[in-house]
Image: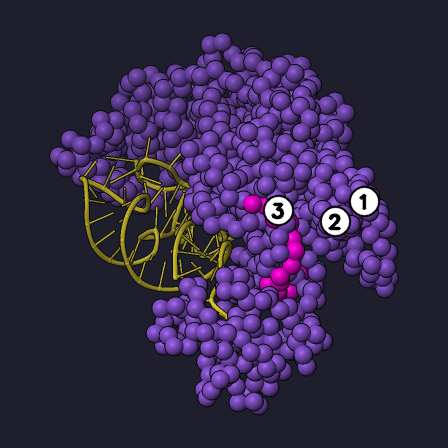
Chain colours: A purple, B yellow
Amino acid sequence: MDPAYDPQKVEARWYSRWEEAGVFRPELNPDGEPFCIVIPPPNVTGSLHMGHALDQTLQDVIIRRKRMQGYAALWLPGTDHAGIATQNVVERELAAEGLTREDLGREAFIEQVWRWKATSGGRITEQIRRMGFSTDWSRERFTMDDGLSHAVRKVFVDLYHEGLIYRGNRIINWCPRCRTALSDIEVEHETIEGRLVTIEYPFTDGDGGIRVATTRPETMLGDTGVAVHPGDERFAGLVGRTVTVPLINRVVPIVADEAVDPEFGTGAVKVTPAHDPLDFDIASRQGLEPIAVIDEVGVITQAGGPYAGLDRFDARREVVADLERGGHLISSEPHTHSVGHCSRCATPIEPYLSLQWFVRVGPLVVPAIEAVRDGTIRFIPDRWEKSYFHWMENLRDWTISRQIWWGHRIPAWYCEACGEVIVSMEEPTGCACGSTTLRQDEDVLDTWFSSGLFPFSTLGWPEDTEDFRRFYPNSVLVTGFDIIYFWVARMIKLGIHLTGEIPFPDVVLHGLVRADDGRKMSKSLGNAIDPLDVVERHGADALRLSLVQAAAQGQDVPFQEEWVDAARRFGNKLWNAVRFATEHLEVGEVPAVGGYPEDPGPEARWILARLAHSVGRIDRMLDEYRFSEAYATAYNFAWSEAFDWYIELTKAPLRDGDAVEARQTLGVVLRDILKMFHPVMPYVTEQLWSHLVGDGFIAAAAWPAPPSLDPPPHFEAFQELVAGVRRLRAEHALAPRHPLELSIVDPEGVVADWWPRQFEALASVTPVIVNDAPAGEHAPIAAGPVHGYVSLAGVVDSEAERSRIDKEIAEARSNLDHAAGKLANEEFVAKAPAAVVAKERARVEQLEDTLAELDRRRAGLG
RNA sequence: GGGCGCUUAGCUCAGUUGGCUAGAGCGCUUCCCUUACAAGGAAGAAGUCGGGGGUUCGAAUCCCUCAGCGCCCACCA
């Protein structure tokens, strides 16, 4: 073995071997209980970012452990076609050649996107491999695959026939740059400093007028009414009269509608049915006609009269200027309000009246809420359930049609002759009216429509496949909280409705990775760190461990490269621990499972008891998805107990040649440490497994199951004595091996009988068992029931020793006061649990003992 | 306008049914190149757990309140 751990060298060699051996396939454990995670599919356009690295590391930790526990574990990988995002990327490439997608035409453009996907789309899957993620590539899926496309089409057709998908003319969110409709959640609201403009619309039949307030004065070009609240006395006599909309001189009625808030602005609202959802509702109740004055690219239409051809924001300025010139502008005041922006390109959204397809969500929502409410599905951490409920309860119908080309084309055909709408799986040959002139809907579906089917469409649904039967419902979903509404909620709604079962019982939600400036890591902010760069510097194992350590349940994860560096050093520590072991053990000597000593002596018993305790804790925590706590436990066990103490304890026996038990124990303990770290650090543990065990893959080995043992009594006393001697040397500036004499009073015979030579090995002292405190100057080292005394004759500056003891006395006294105070409190004794009281009593006893000893020594020093 | 999260060592953060003598990594101080590891070892300094109030035998942990920071949702035109 190399003396130093080289992540790059180690990580180059295992992935293809795992893959070739079929380790990542559930068939590895054919008789195991199924366990399945479906990956949140990254965009084909994308490259791996820190958020993926975190998300997928957590999934790999889960799946690798389950695999080791004998489950038929499947982690199904896939990618998402990401309609708008991907189309934008390819369009940008075309633009560089001076071309638009229209220049190519639909078919050629789509071919171009597929070509692009074939060459660039594989990058993300390569990166997933580099990270060591154990996905089953034989089952890889893409949302535009034949199978998944078939599922999408079937769902559309079925929901249409159930009346849950419909087509309608409504106000939707429109991005004038992407030139497509968007759903409500694809709109990001941003608080903007705008202006609230008050305009007076003169009465048609007399003097004066009615004042309306608006933040979007340009929309007045499309006004077809003015509305007031029916109960608003200020306007009581005005309802039914007409006003003339300035600039375009349209005569429109004043109507009364409940939707108007009398408190806002002037209490009267201009009604622009074609460009505002609220106005659209009012208009449909009041019989007002919509007039579209802004077109699909955000330019004023012919209906906008003299403003036709102007961009919407230029038109706003012109309209206000003209209103002012005409004396119609009453005021213009600063006004902060929130404005929707396209989540893909940040262009301000235009509410736009158009014919779109919608999913009627009402009937889907009810069971989806119920499943979470009754605990069939649980969110971890559960605080997200509340916002899930709130969001679901206020959902509006989902706009699913997109006016782009890259995606699942809507399976609807329109008869040119009679206008009949035909929705079907296969392209219809003709219409019932006899015509064969059919035209397919031009639109494609929202990308999230297909991702919403991912937990089952990837397993072969709607066919009744073996995978679907085995792995649906999935076992757990792991994803970021930012995607609950986009994805999680839709999988739940669609999953329950279409399959009759919940898609997964557990939803584990982690936070966002934040950069060291505390902000969300993102390309656009320029603070993103490429995980692959970090992997190059420190290795995938180190990055993975550092992310797991930092990912406290559901909290955001601050990324700091020092953590990765520390994780890499842990890898080095593991490396060298195994290297030490292999200097004493033969390959083949350490079995892949079991092999624990039958009736271990004290050292072995101690570390095995600690091992069993740690594995138990880790299991409990991982079962509860408390990744960072589980691996803090594993890390501390490995480093602070196994390496710092146990390896040191094996050195004397190994050297002295009576090492049967030490060899055996060292082997199984290190083997189990490798196993517990394998889910997080797959590469280095696999490499070290090959050196230590050399039998099969650790990736396919059984999860640790050490026997539960009682720890030997008073091991802590031994540790304290060793530490005490070391401290004494340090504080008196003595060399680490400066000879000292340690006398031990050990009435129960629990320490010194076991480890005389270990004191020599770990503390460089030779202990002498005595019955009473020795005479002469010595330093007391109290350790519970055992007392140690280090002779100070001629070696120690008694002044320094006095101050050391004074310090210890002060500390002991303060602790004693605190504990004694508790016990003096009758209510504490009466009400606290017996175990807590007993613990406190023992503590007081020990402290009194210690203090008496310290006092005696202090007096002895003069 | 609603809802949520955060505030703990110099820095970044852990700390699930209240029992903590409050932890980790990095940084800092002292000593040590001891044949697994100097990417290391040993020892150490360092915190009124944001402020105030309350519940309790006992609060970093539960309740109220104030302050600062951050996030999500929302058709007040």
Q: Amino acid at mark 2?
A: Cys
Q: Which residue is mark 2?
A: A418
Q: Which residue is mark 3?
A: A166
Q: Amino acid at mark 1?
A: Ser
Q: Nearer the viewer, residue A679 or A182?
A: A182
Instruction: Find out whether the residues at labels 1 and 2 contact each other: C-beta distance under 8 Å.
Output: yes
Residue A301: percent from the left, percent from the top? Answer: 69, 72
Q: Which residue is mark 1?
A: A435
Q: Residues within 10 Å of mark 2 (few under 14, many from 20)?
A: few
From the image, state whether disc 1 or disc 3 is nearer to you.
1
Tell me the quarter of the image containing the N terminus of chain A: top right
Instruction: Please tell me in which quadrant of the rendered image residue A95 appears.
Output: bottom right
Query: In the image, is A99 to the left or to the right of A787?
Result: right
SS at circle 2: loop
Q: CA distance from mark 2 to mark 3?
A: 19 Å
Q: Nearer the viewer, residue A822 or A541?
A: A541
Q: Earlier in the sequence, mark 2 or mark 3?
A: 3
**Which portion, as a residue range, is magenta?**
A344-360
Tell me the quarter of the image containing the C terminus of chain A: top left
Instruction: Please tell me in which quadrant of the rendered image residue A683 appears.
Output: top right
